[in-house]
Amino acid sequence: MSDESPEAAESSEPAPEEAEATPAYPPVNTTDPQLTFRAIATGMFFGGLLSLCNIYSGLKIGWGFNMSITAMLLSFGLYKSLEKVGARPYGMLENNINQTAASAGANISSAGLVAPIPALTILTGEQLGWGVLAAWTLAVSLVGIVVGIGLRRQMLIVDELAFPAGIASAETIKQMYARGSEAMARVKALLAGALFGGGAKALIHFAKIKKLLLPGSMNASGAAAGAGITKYTLPNLGFVLDWSPLMVAVGALIGIRAGWSMLLGAIVAWGYLAPMALDAGWAEPGAAEAGAVWFGSLNKWMLWPGVSMMVTAALTSFAFSWKSVVAAIRGTRKAATSDAGESQHDVPRQIFLGALVAVLILATLGQVFFFEIGIGLAISAVLLTFVLAIVAGRVSGETGITPVGPMGKVTQLIFGVVSPGNVSSNLMAANVTGGAASQTADMLHDMKTGLLIGASPKFQAVAQTFGVVAGATIGSWGYLLLIPDPQGMLLTEEWAAPAVLAWKTVAELFRDGIEAMPEMAPMAMAVGGGLGVVLAVLEKVLSKEKRKFVPSPSAMGLALVIPAYYAISMFLGGLISVVAERVNSKWAKRFVIVIAAGIIAGESLVGVGIAIYQTLTGIAG
């Protein structure tokens, strides 16, 4: 996962067994097939397909998932089946090229499609067409790829940073090819999860199954009572049970600490703060019909403490990585002045330098022509992006968490001061930083996998490039299909889009000032921000044993800006994963994560399919 929301996705998809130490690096394998047509084509296909899953989940809850292991399992199962009808064996290094391209394509959501781009539309009404979206997200991603190419030797060979998701993927792919039957068992579990998730989504939609309303209410007072409201029912506040398995699967992936933190945040937010805001007249109630969830109206006030908590927690956590920042800058200087020999398997220096100039021009021209940002400001944004993407790569290598959110917020704050009131420059200059940082980290994790199994980094760079082409073209189409009207569809009960909310809120602050905020929102923002700082500091300074009792500030902040029933579902998912671990630890380690990933992919893809169906039937009608 990328750290997009709370500002969040804070771990990559774990492997069943993760390595504790970095093993010795094998030499590059020059005999087995690697960069084959089928490996690239399969990676592009799965990357484009899985990009839709990340866009779907990103617009629901702000999370995006690392799809490397999912792509490995899917392609392994595909070609093992084809081998039975005469296809040549599908090798580990081919599969590595596939996962490199697929993870790059799936990661296109972080290039702006689930945060700054819809935030721009909501604030300005400017809806980008498919061509502009595809070109822009591709340009942003290519910046990250080129930076990743330049950092590979320093961060992987010289500094030997862990990049834990890369190690997890390497261990998984080696296990798959050492024990093919085990890999096929996981493929079947993945597909079973996908069938369950997709089937549940289709059933809920076409059978019009409604959420289960929970009994209970609390008395209204003050301004609400004066407006004729006597009670707030639990469904009004979002306390219902959602039959969708997607959020339960997400909870199984994020773990019980994030799950109970979200449940706690939901209880505090929607069980205490929301009624208080209604009673005081700071927030407006929603529709009067029975069972109506008032998320849309309440969220206009609740977003301020929630976003503040997420942003301050993310920036505080990032501040604890100052040593990594210094090391990244020093390392880059050393790499720039080093005369270390270039491997024949690395991207040639002349090609790298040419690509560096090309992406600088592309990202600059994109800002100028697509968003009317001044050329000086646009160039500054890309140059700043180079520096911050290096920092993000270093932090991701050491912790496994890619600070996409903090990187974007740093740029938003800088350009909010340099160009106050300019929404486009605030959002889209930061878009370059956040998207490039995410793609840089994704590439370095993939390169770590390749390093551990003897893959060619030059071939992986090619695969990554093909992957983002597939992700940009298919992902942009999927985004427009899912959300044809961001102003009317997002920041609602159906599409909470917390990452969009966070980017939009920061841009609005610089455009409108604090005086434009709702009554008492500045105070709520200060309290939420302060709590985010305190909890983030406790996360860093307490022992591992004590830390598990500290609520996650990112998860709690997220609970304030999504419906309460999402938090309930994610808590249930975390609880299920714990119970499964207690009942059968071996089975849980093998299958819980894989099944959860399948459910997420299945429901997301069926959700996209339903959107296509509705579009076609609307045209036919």
Image (cartoon, rainbow, N blue to C red):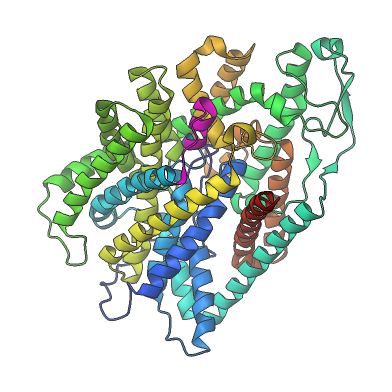
Q: Looking at the rendering, which quadrant does residue 535 occupy? A: top right
* Rendered location of residue 353, percent (x, y): 17, 50
Please give the name of the residue rendered at 53% of the width and 70% of the height, measured from the top-left corner: 74
Q: Position of residue 224 (x, y in %)?
A: 82, 14
Instruction: Please tell me in which quadrant of the rendered image residue 170 appears.
Output: bottom left
Vertical order, 135 against 216 (above or below):
below
Q: Residue at x 62, y 73 (%)?
A: 188
Residue 151, position as x, y percentages in the image: 26, 50
The dominant secondary structure in magenta is helix
Q: Position of residue 328 (x, y in %)?
A: 27, 42
Name above or below for residue 31 compared with residue 305. Answer: below
Q: Say if the magenta span includes residue 124.
A: yes
- Residue at 66% over, 35% down: 562
The span shown in magenta is 117-130
Q: Is residue 123 above or below residue 399?
A: above
Q: Nearer the viewer, residue 192 or 120?
A: 120
Residue 327 appears anywhere in the view: no
**Residue 435 is a magenta residue:** no
Name the one closer to the observer, 93 or 11: 93
